[in-house]
Amino acid sequence: MTYARIAGVGSCLPEKVLTNKDLEGMMDTSDEWIRERTGMKRRHVAGEGETTGSMSLIAAQRALEMAGMAADELDMIVVGTCTPDKIIPATATIVQRELGIKGCPALDVNAACSGFLYGLDYANRYFLTGGAKKALVIGAETLTRIVNWEDRTTAVLFGDGAGAVVLEVSDEPGILATHIHANGEFEELLHTTGGISRGFDASCDRDGFVRMEGNAVFKRAVATFDSIARETVADLDGHLDDIDWFIPHQANMRIIKAAAKKLSMPMERVISTVDEHANTSAASIPLALDLAVREGRIKRGDTLLMAAFGAGFTWGSAMLKF
Ligand code: ACO
């Protein structure tokens, strides 16, 4: 059997850090409220010249280096993002150009916080049908550029960054299963009000900022993490005990803890970076993966379960042997 196996991981975080204390000076909020409600302590914020594309490039170069692979060996590039550098072209094509290669397909996937797992699912299907032998899958965001810094209910929650994996074809088990889903009924619970067909016009005062009904999203996120994790494990006739590490999307520490509890997963087996990175949307899972691999916590042969939930709603999971 042919598998897509992770050959290298990499990430990139902007240099600038905003702590909860910094936010206290910018809006009516407190370090205590943010820590208690979200578990977040600080977040990285893209500075001048730092973009989804530039961070993707650095994450990709680090992942390629770990894989011992040259960029021109890649058969495809997928970038999961809802904050591309420009509407067109796709950020993936910018990454491709900056890697100094051309010819292989390069595209963005917008599934909000589930973007990385959507990208992984997409690339994996190419491996399973013989369409790719080497691929780069990235999750990257500059969400702090689309939050309203006067809206404390959203501004404190997000951060910027990028994470990347290089996949390589293998006879050894790699990606074991992926599942992705969506339900567009809940658009208004988490969205940006402005867009190409809504107020995107030089003559009007458009507002493209993120708006969220936090409470409603919270409840659905917890329930969905549980069901998507169980779906994936059951699909493989496996058990949650088989999982060495659970890497959930890093939206909120309370969501992560509630999901882990429902899955009877001890927190010692959960990778969490929400305290340091806040919610980096599509970047959060590959960022957490890279950190845990480079810290030596995740080792070759470990079984990983990843799960994400985001605007749309979209949700997805992946189970793999690292
Ligand atoms: N500082 C201080 N007070 C605040 C802040 C703040 N930053 N934000 C809100 N409050 C206040 C509210 O105004 C409210 O005050 P009131 O009781 O006087 O009306 C109070 O705190 C409680 O507000 P809630 O919204 O009920 O707080 P909650 O406990 O639900 O926490 C949060 C809010 C953190 C947003 C939570 O609901 C959450 O994490 N939701 C899910 C986020 C998520 O999973 N997103 C999905 C992915 S994101 C993506 O796809 C891009």
Image: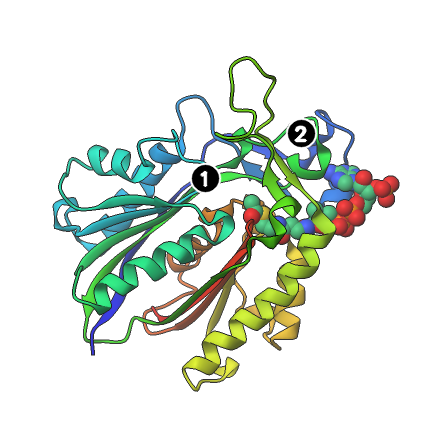
**Which label's residue is closer to the chain start, 2 or 1?**
2
From the viewer's perspective, is 246 left or right of 65? right
Viewer-nearest residue: 160 or 147: 147
Dividing the picture into quadrants, the one containing residue 162 is top left
Q: Residues within 10 Å of mark 2 (few under 14, many from 20)?
A: few
From the viewer's perspective, is 318 left or right of 280? left
Q: Confirm or deny contact between disc 2 and disc 1 (CB under 8 A).
A: no
In the rendered view of the protein, which quadrant contains the N terminus?
bottom left
Q: Residues within 10 Å of mark 1 (few under 14, many from 20)?
A: many
| Residue 317 drawn at (x, y percent) | 46, 65
> Where's ligand 1: which quadrant?
top right
Residue furthest to the top in view is 203
Looking at the rendered structure, the kind of residue marked 2 is Asp
| Residue 13 drawn at (x, y percent) | 44, 39
Whether the residue under disc 1 has CB within 8 Å of ligand 1: no
- Which residue does the image show at 72% across and 38% down from the upper left? 153
Secondary element under disc 1, as helix, strand or loop, is strand
- Which residue does the image show at 37% across and 71% down from the upper left? 320
Viewer-nearest residue: 135 or 6: 135
From the viewer's perspective, is 42 left or right of 21? left
Looking at the rendered structure, the kind of residue marked 1 is Glu
Residue furthest to the bottom in view is 237
In the rendered view of the protein, which quadrant contains the C terminus?
bottom left
- Residue 37 visible here: no
Badge number at residue 141? 1
- Which residue does the image show at 19% across and 75% down from the upper left? 171
Which residue, given by chain and number where applicable, does mark 2 sit on? 22
| Residue 84 drawn at (x, y percent) | 40, 35
Dividing the picture into quadrants, the one containing residue 199 is top right
